Structures are given as C-alpha cells and as structure tokens.
Amino acid sequence: MKPTVSSVIALAITALPAFAQDEVIDSATLREDARFYFEPIPQEPVAPEGNELTPERVDLGAMLFFDPRMSRSGLFSCQSCHNVGIGGTDGLEVSIGHGWQQGPRNSPTMYNAIFNIAQFWDGRAGDLAEQAKGPLQASVEMNNTPENLVETLQSMPGYVEAFEAAFPGQDDPVSFDNFAVAIEAYEATLITPDSPFDLFLNGDDDAMTDQEKRGLAAFINTGCVSCHAGINVGGQDYFPFGLVERPGGSVLPEGDRGRFEVTQTVDDEYVFRASPLRNIALTAPYFHSGVVWDLSEAVAIMSTSQLGTELAEAQIDEIVAFLGTLTGKQPEVTHPVLPVRTSATPQPQPMYAQ
Amino acid sequence: MKPTVSSVIALAITALPAFAQDEVIDSATLREDARFYFEPIPQEPVAPEGNELTPERVDLGAMLFFDPRMSRSGLFSCQSCHNVGIGGTDGLEVSIGHGWQQGPRNSPTMYNAIFNIAQFWDGRAGDLAEQAKGPLQASVEMNNTPENLVETLQSMPGYVEAFEAAFPGQDDPVSFDNFAVAIEAYEATLITPDSPFDLFLNGDDDAMTDQEKRGLAAFINTGCVSCHAGINVGGQDYFPFGLVERPGGSVLPEGDRGRFEVTQTVDDEYVFRASPLRNIALTAPYFHSGVVWDLSEAVAIMSTSQLGTELAEAQIDEIVAFLGTLTGKQPEVTHPVLPVRTSATPQPQPMYAQ
C-alpha cells in the first residue's frame, strides 16, 4: 500500500530514526524504510493505459519524436527540448522555440515520465499523449497546427505506411490523436532502470556508498520524502513551492502561479507537481524557472523554502550524493531514418508569424 | 585512371552512344561506361589523411557531433543542420542559426562528404576537420569561440577522458584542433554503400530498372557527367553555375558569387563545387540557394543552365529515376549519451550578442 501524503509527512516527522553523520548505517533497516516510500524503476517498459507497445507503434513514435518537420519552422522536434543524450532535457534555463522565443518554464525530462501522476510542471496534461499535443501547438515552441501536421504526415508514404502498421484496422490511422498516442508509446519505453539506488532497493548493500546511504536517510528523515516519493522520487503529487518560506523572485517568479492556471483555485497558487528526481544529476538547471545550476544550491533552497530549516553543508553533500544514485542506465537510442518528403509535403515556414 | 574534366566533356559529347527511350539497354555496356566515370561507395569507412578511425576517436566525434552545448546558445549541434535522419541535411532552404538568423546557403550533407574534393559549396575547407571549425564559429550558426568551446570541454570529466582516449600520448588532448579531428573521424564513418546504383556498378543487372538505366545513360550522354562524376557523382571539382545560361535570381542570387570569395579570381565568379548527388532524393530542397524543392525542376534547370538544352519530360523522368538509385543504405546511428556538465561548465548564452 502506498502511503498518502499526509501519512508520509506524519511518518517523516514522528516515526523515523535520524542517523548521525558518522553513524554506520544499517542497510537492511534503511532499505526497509526506503521501500516504504519508493519503488525501483522496472526493467521493462509498461504500456500506458489504453495504449499498446507494439514494435510498429514504438518505432513510429520514435520517428515522430525525432522529426523536426513536425514543427512549423522545420527546426524543432521533441528531441530538441528533450534530448535523449542529456538526461531527456535541453540543458537550458528555459527552452528556445519558434522565432527564438523563450518558453516560460524549464523543460522537464521524458525519461520515466510515464510514472508521473500527470505531465508538465503544473500537471495540466493527464498523460504523455495529451502532453505531446501541447508543445506541437504552442506558439513559442513548435508553432504548428494539427491540420498542418496531418497534412505533413499524409504527404509522406513512409509515414502513411508506418501509421497503418502502428494502428492496424483503423479507417483513418493518420491523425493528430494517433500522432500523440505513438509518441506516448515511444516515451513509455524511455525508462532508466538499474540506478545504484534501485540496485540498493533490490537488495544490493554495496550499490550505494555510506555517504549516499546517509543522504538517503537524511532525505527521508528531514522530510524531503514528504513531497518526493514514489517510483520517480517525485512527480506523484502537487505541493506549494515555498511551503514554509517563499524563495526569491528569480527562483519562483511571481507571474507564474503554477497549478492555479489549471484549476483556478486559490489553494493552487504557486503549487507545482513535485519534481521527479530520477537522473537529477544529469538535468541541470533546476526548478521550473531553471535559474539554479548547482544541485547543492537547489537542495539548500528546498530545505529553507519547503522544510523551514537550514541543513548543514555536510548533510546537503550527503543528500546530493544520494541524488546522484538516482542516475539510471540511459536507454540506447537508435536515431530513426525518417520518411522522405514529397512534393505534397508542406514546406517549412521559419518566418511564419508567431 | 580517372578521366580529367576536359576529357570527360570531350567524351560525353563525342564518344558515347545515345539510347532511344524505348531501346533495350545492354547492361554490360552501360556498366562499362558508368565505371569509367563513377565508383561505388566502399563497404567500409576509409580514414581521412592524417586521421585514425579508432573506436575511441569515432565515439568522441559522435558525442561532439550530437552535443548542442558546443553552440553558444546551447541549441545547435552539427546534427541540427546535418540530420542523420534526413539524408544528412535539415530540409530547410537555408539553415536557421543563432538568434534565428538564416544562413546564406543550403546545408549540404555530411554523408559520404569524406569523398568530396573539399568541403562547403565553394570548397573553402580542404577537409572535414577544417569544415567542422566553420559553423562552430560562424555568428549566424553556432556562434561559439574556440576558447569557450575548449573551456566547455575541459569542464566535463567525461569529455576530458574521451579526448585522452581518442588522442593517447598527447600532452594537451582537449583542443579545438582535436575537436575538429574527432568530428572528421566520425563523419568519415557516415557513408551510404549498397545503393541500387552501386549494386549495378558491382555487377547486379537487376539492381536498376530499365527506366533507371535509361536515366543513367542519359546522365552520361547529355553531359551531366561532365560535372557530376566520381564516387559521389559530383563533389569532385568546381564549375560555373550558369555555364550556358544563368538561371533566375532566386536560384542563383547575384550577391553570392561562390568560389570567387575564396580565390578572388574573376574566373571563379559564380563557380561552385559540383553538387555531390549521392542520396539526392532525400535531401530537398536543392541548389546552394535551396529554393527548388522538386528534383525534376532541379534537373530541368540544370539542363538549360549547364547543358543549354531543354530535355524532354520523359528524359527528365528517367534521369530523376536514376538519381533515385543513388540512395544508399543509411547508417544506423546510435545517439550518444553525452558527458555531464559541472559547475565549471560555461552556461548557455542564448541572448549573446551576435
């Protein structure tokens, strides 16, 4: 049974032992505690609800993911902002999009995103298929329309055949909906098992160093786990940023009220989905604003804003060391060979009005 | 022995038989003629002069090729304009670069580029290593400096180790020169053997259809081969664009005088390297200006501007069919996992003054 958020908070505050910095950690006890809050990434991908991970569908999703012709300008693909070589992010504070516009928030990773409760920093997309439709249409990102997209796909026999194979028996397989479903199928395969943390969770005492284990204990005992729990060590629920103390304006810009824009509920002002921390050591810069480049600084900001405490430097180091154990085996990604355009394919429009 | 350009022209005009449209092609004779002008792409990569294709060096080159952090903004990598999934091009008229600036010329493919006499449309880089240094520094492209690049590479242990392994025994392996040499090594592996044309050259009569064979014969007999010869069916020498009749201003803009900018010699006004035609069916749009999207139209323009003749539509179709046989086996490219940045890594500067 998964603990509820409030039970997690209560447990974090009342029930768990604290480890002194030089204390020898009992791995069995720590593992038992950790398994209460976390789960390892599975070895094999799991099909999203209502989707199927057939090779044809996953391969089609890979083509769509890597194809810059899905954007109005012809420059941007999903890969542009969710780079498979950089932990699934672009390494920018905020992404650059159509016409060199900058997006409002830092680009989150698609690695293991299948395990998040919902997608985007504010959870406004219920699943990865819904998510995929967002950037494609956003004027500051790919700046495309469903109509222009489907016309593009329809114009290339390579895509028409791939959609027919991925969605057999459908009358009209080349559709915006199926575009999104195929990308969801591909992204569901982008998981990073076998991190040192997962190996430890699965019983290998030597997979983590003593410092990393102390960091894990601190992560649990100081209360980080109250928000960052579950399989993705985050991504499982929504919490106010600045729970105890609001961080400075550059970290938490006033204009971005987070989940409030989704629910229009005052309680959701400056509420965000807890950031999933898998592969966090690969995905600087941090926070939705992307202004913090150093993981230690990010942990320090979290401790004052969310926990209301200033952690000692050594403990921050331990927590950062633990976060490093969340780096899993990165998928081996083969770049797809993309279908060939025809004279019917809409031309890229880099200068299209935004 | 390879024919010289003038001998090629003389032969094309005087020595070769013309095939009527419905004539049955004798494959053996056609192959003999074709082997006089062309060579198949080899099965295995060949090391560029002064370079070595060690796995370490090729792997490093792949990392550098795919790493957007090599650009000032953090958005562009070599792959942005030389997409391994689109025949090695970006499918744009001219590439988009730093600050959404547009480059002056259409992006050529790096597939089989190792076999070109020199690099860029005007041949201003003698080899692929020299080429790689250009876009990195061009203000309208990656907008970086060698100093910022080397600082970036030095800051990441993953790169430092990879350079040491790729350039063993060197005192200072992380350098701008070695960056270029590693990319050259990687690009030398990006070749596309086993096209139908190559299979035909190598003795398989059935690898090409009769229409394609008639197209090959027409390509030789009408004189296309005078400029497009050698292993890359082009890319082997320089010729004036508009030899007989200058095409319209959008195809051959007056402001771009081609190789004249390199040599400052009047004879080189509007002279360009003959476009290598390998995989040409994958790499629309065409010409250095990138304004022609249709291969038939490109062939028609070439026939009037370079040959001074208007080819019949059926013959253009045959030549286009032949050009389709130049599509080789695209390399299976694994996207590299890139080294992790550190706090010493220079941050991307998307708003850096251009």
Image: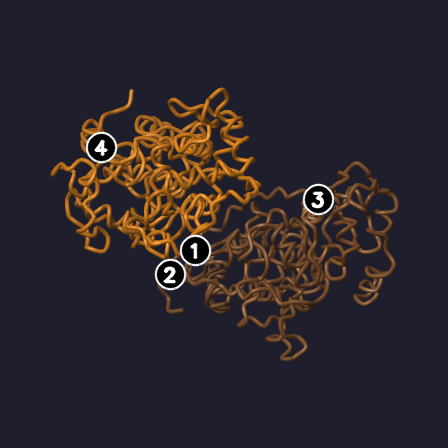
Chain colours: A brown, B orange
| Most foreground residue, B108 or A225 | A225
Q: Residue at x 21, y 43 (%)?
A: B258
Side (left or right) of B26 relative to A226: left
Q: Are marks 1 and 3 on the same chain?
A: yes
For disc 1, the marked residue is A75
SS assignment at label 4: helix
Above or below for A98 versus B76: below
Query: How much space separates mark 4 and mark 2, taking CA atoms?
Result: 42 Å
Give the alpha-carbon distance from disc 2 to disc 1, as whole Å: 8 Å
Mark 1: amino acid: Leu
Q: Earlier in the sequence, mark 3 or mark 2?
A: 3
Q: Which residue is mark 4?
A: B12
Quadrant of the snapshot with the N terminus of chain B: top left
Q: Secondary structure at mark 2?
A: loop
Q: Chain of mark 1?
A: A
- Evaluate whether residue B87 shows in this view: no
Q: Nearer the viewer, residue B185 or A170?
A: B185
Toward the bottom, the furthest residue is A265
Which mark's residue is nearer the viewer, 3 or 2? 3
| Tag 3 secondary structure | loop
Closer to us: B60 or A287: A287
Amino acid marked by disc 4: Ala
Distance from label 3 to label 2 (Cα)? 42 Å
Tag 3 residue: A325
Q: Nearer the viewer, mark 4 or mark 3?
A: 3
Spatial CA distance of label 1 from label 4 is 41 Å
| Front residue of this view, candidates B28 and A263 | A263
Q: Amino acid at mark 2?
A: Pro
**Disc 3 vs disc 2: Cβ atoms closer than 8 Å?**
no
Q: CA distance from mark 4 to mark 3?
A: 67 Å
Q: Is residue B181 left or right of residue B139?
A: right
Q: Nearer the viewer, mark 4 or mark 2?
A: 2
